[in-house]
Image (cartoon, rainbow, N blue to C red):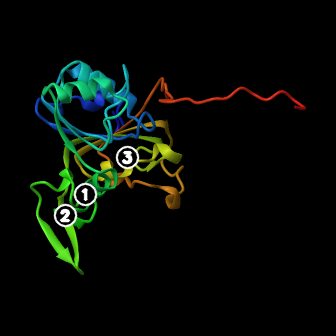
Amino acid sequence: MAGKVYPDAAAALAGITRDGMTVMSGGFGLSGNPENLIAALRATGVRDLTVISNNCGADGFGLWTLLADGQIRKMISSYIGDNKLFEQLYLDGRLELELSPQGTLAERIRAGGAGIPAFYTKTGVGTVVAEGKPLERFEDELYVRETWLRADLSLVKAWKGDPEGNLVFRKTARNFNPVMATAGRVTIAEVEQLVPPGALDADQIHTPGIYVDRILQGVAYEKRIEKLTTRPREAVGS
């Protein structure tokens, strides 16, 4: 190991995982998932986890594998649909769930990284999302108070990174990854390309290395497509 650079995901997780910890995991659907780190986290056998992620993987892949192994106690998410295991565990009372609207979830994570304990939003007022939360009126409109989210460990995936931990994300795989990188007590990034120092244009860096504690070059990315819709190609000249 040299500085922040680790040879693989298992080495990057060594010594920092424990039962009962809170973990943020980047990704939206199956786009931008830290595939190597999730697999390595599963292999550690840690249990009783609280996981903060937009959803929880898909059948047989990603965070779903931690659910299937009974390693997750609670999910803080904005979407359950299309994950039958997630749905069933929640309905059976075997999984705790804190459901947060998607934009609110992103802002709670951003607030955690920025050191802002709470903020107000109109989203969720008058719904179950606001139950038990303080309400306050601003300019004759009701707002619900939401609190920050922080984690013991943030797992993120980027397109490119350098040995200092500076990260560049690619297109929609960016999603929740940049805000999660700021909100972990320890942040580990896996990248598709680990480039030499100075190779990244400073103006193109999405996440400065100050937020990243450990970095590794990932391998064997599947980049699964969660839903693929196609149509027959029209015949030439028709």
Residue in the picture at 46% in, 25% down: 219
* 157 versus 8 height, above or below: below
Q: Say which mark, if any, is on residue 124.
A: 1
To which residue does mark 3 refer?
177
The first of marks 3 and 2 along the sequence is 2
Tell me the element at label 2: strand
Q: Which comes before the other along the chain, label 2 or label 1?
A: 1
Residue 8 visible in rendering: no
Mark 3: secondary structure: helix
Which is nearer the N-term, disc 1 or disc 3? 1
In this rendering, the answer to whether 49 lies above or below 203 is above
Name the residue: 33% across, 50% down.
102
In the rendered image, which quarter is residue 210 located in? bottom left
Q: Is residue 139 visible?
A: yes
Q: CA distance from mark 3 to mark 2?
A: 26 Å
Mark 2 closeness class: few <14, some 14–19, many ≥20 residues within 10 Å: many
Residue 184: x and y in percent read 23, 47
The image position of residue 107, as x and y in percent, is 29, 58
Query: Separation of disc 1 and disc 3 at Cα?
Result: 24 Å
- Tell me the quadrant of the picture where the C terminus can be found: top right
- Mark 2 and mark 1 in contact? Answer it, CB < 8 Å: yes
Q: Residue at x 15, y 24 (%)?
A: 92
Residue on which the image places disc 2: 144
The kind of residue tagged 3 is Asn
| Residue 214 x, y percent position in the rendering | 31, 40
Q: Is residue 101 left or right of residue 221?
A: left
Amino acid bearing label 1: Gly
Q: Nearer the viewer, residue 148 or 192?
A: 148
Q: Nearer the viewer, mark 1 or mark 3?
A: 1
Query: Mark 2 is on which residue type?
Result: Val
SS under mark 1: loop
